[in-house]
Image: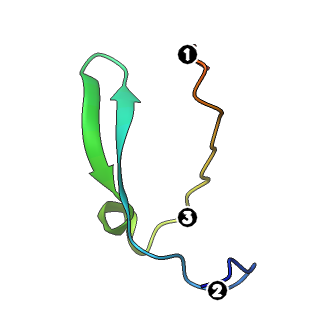
Amino acid sequence: MRVQVGREAIDFEASAFIDGTGFKPVRLTDYKGKWIVLCFYPGDFTFV
């Protein structure tokens, strides 16, 4: 599958750091119908 602007992204699950809560698993479908920005950062063990 090719990533393309304007096309629906495939569903995935990842760990996210939530301020005041810590790490929590989130799924792309948790945000269905909402605008989101996905930022991927190389895993160098620093918080962005």
Earlier residue among tags 2 and 1: 2
Cα separation between marks 2 and 3? 14 Å
Residue 29 position within the rendered picture, expressed as x and y whole percent measured from the top left: 33, 69
In the displayed structure, does residue 40 sit left or right of residue 19? right
In the displayed structure, does residue 19 sit left or right of residue 38? left
Q: Look at discs 2 and 3 and give the one toward the viewer.
A: 2
Extreme residue toward the right, this view: 5
Q: Is residue 16 above or below residue 23?
A: below
Residue in the picture at 55% in, 64% down? 35
Q: Is residue 3 above or below residue 37?
A: below
Label 2, residues with CA under 10 Å away: few <14, some 14-19, many ≥20: few
The image quadrant that residue 42 belongs to is top right
Residue 38 position within the rendered picture, expressed as x and y whole percent measured from the top left: 59, 52
Residue with the mark numbered 1? 47
Q: Amino acid at mark 2?
A: Arg
Helix, strand or loop at label 1? It is loop
Residue with the mark numbered 3? 35
Q: Amino acid at mark 3?
A: Trp
Label 1, residues with CA under 10 Å away: few <14, some 14-19, many ≥20: few
Residue 45 position within the rendered picture, expressed as x and y whole percent measured from the top left: 53, 16
Residue with the mark numbered 2? 7
Q: Amino acid at mark 1?
A: Phe
Name the quadrant of the N terminus: bottom right
Depth check: 34 or 11 in front? 11
Earlier residue among tags 2 and 3: 2
Cα separation between marks 2 and 1? 29 Å
Q: Look at discs 3 and 1 and give the one toward the viewer.
A: 1
Helix, strand or loop at label 2? It is loop
Earlier residue among tags 3 and 1: 3
Residue 14 position within the rendered picture, expressed as x and y whole percent measured from the top left: 36, 47
Label 3, residues with CA under 10 Å away: few <14, some 14-19, many ≥20: few
Residue in the picture at 55% in, 83% down? 8
